[in-house]
Image (cartoon, rainbow, N blue to C red):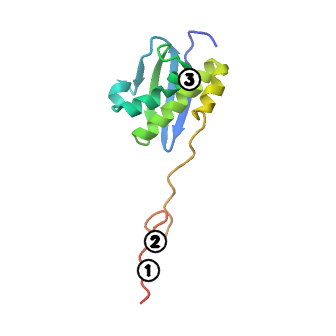
């Protein structure tokens, strides 16, 4: 890949979708037009987003622009983390073993179970009355 062309990838988690645009820079991360610290306020969420960079020791090398939608904040954190990990591999395939060992390349397939008809939720039943 050329050094000037941005790397684009997608990450998903539950119903959250994150589109990642990554290019060489000084380590600025913006999510939906806001800084990462503003959009993801807790340290745990910020560390989740930065985890692929910490594992590969590339935290200050990339500027990342994220468009996240759907789901909640924890789902969006997982989607952004997957998208960043995929973008790093697109740039340098030799990073794959270290990211895979940490489980950052696996798309978490767990979704909310759908509500069934004839009952109030996915598993819950209406109260049974014998008489």
- How far apart, in angstroms, are the residues tagged by discs 3 and 2? 45 Å
Q: Which quadrant of the figure contains the N terminus?
A: top right
Who's the residue at 46% across and 69% down the image?
119
Circle 3 — which element?
strand
Judging depth in this view, the residue of 77 and 43 nearest the camera is 43
Q: Against 61, is 106 above or below? A: below
Instruction: Say left or right for 92 vs 117.
Output: right
- Marks 2/1 in contact by CB < 8 Å: the verdict is yes
Q: Against 19, is 91 above or below? A: above
Q: Which of label 3 and label 2 is nearer to you?
A: 2
Who's the residue at 57% across and 33% down the image?
104
Return the residue at label 2: 125
Instruction: Say left or right for 116 vs 93.
Output: left
Return the residue at label 3: 8
- How far apart, in angstroms, are the residues tagged by discs 1 and 3? 53 Å
- How far apart, in angstroms, are the residues tagged by discs 2 and 1? 8 Å
Judging depth in this view, the residue of 113 and 55 nearest the camera is 55
Whole-percent x, y for residue 14 in the image = 50, 44
Who's the residue at 43% across and 67% down the image?
120
Return the residue at label 1: 128
Q: Rate crowding at label 2 as few (under 14), some (14 to 19) or many (20 or more) other CA atoms within 10 Å.
A: few
Circle 2 — which element?
loop
Q: Which of label 1 and label 3 is nearer to you?
A: 1
Whole-percent x, y for residue 7 in the image = 57, 19
């Amino acid at each position: 890949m050329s050094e000037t062309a941005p790397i684009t990838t997608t990450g998903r988690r539950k119903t959250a979708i994150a589109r990642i645009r990554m290019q060489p820079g000084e380590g600025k991360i913006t999510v939906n037009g806001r800084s990462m610290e503003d959009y993801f306020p807790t340290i745990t969420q910020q560390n989740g987003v930065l985890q692929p960079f910490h594992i590969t020791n590339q935290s200050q090398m990339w500027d990342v622009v994220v468009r996240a939608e759907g789901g909640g904040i924890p789902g969006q954190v997982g989607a952004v983390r997957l998208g960043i990990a995929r973008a790093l591999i697109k740039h340098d395939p030799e990073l794959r073993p270290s990211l895979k060992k940490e489980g950052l390349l696996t798309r978490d397939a767990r979704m909310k179970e759908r509500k069934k008809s004839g009952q109030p939720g996915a598993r819950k039943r209406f109260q049974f009355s014998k008489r």
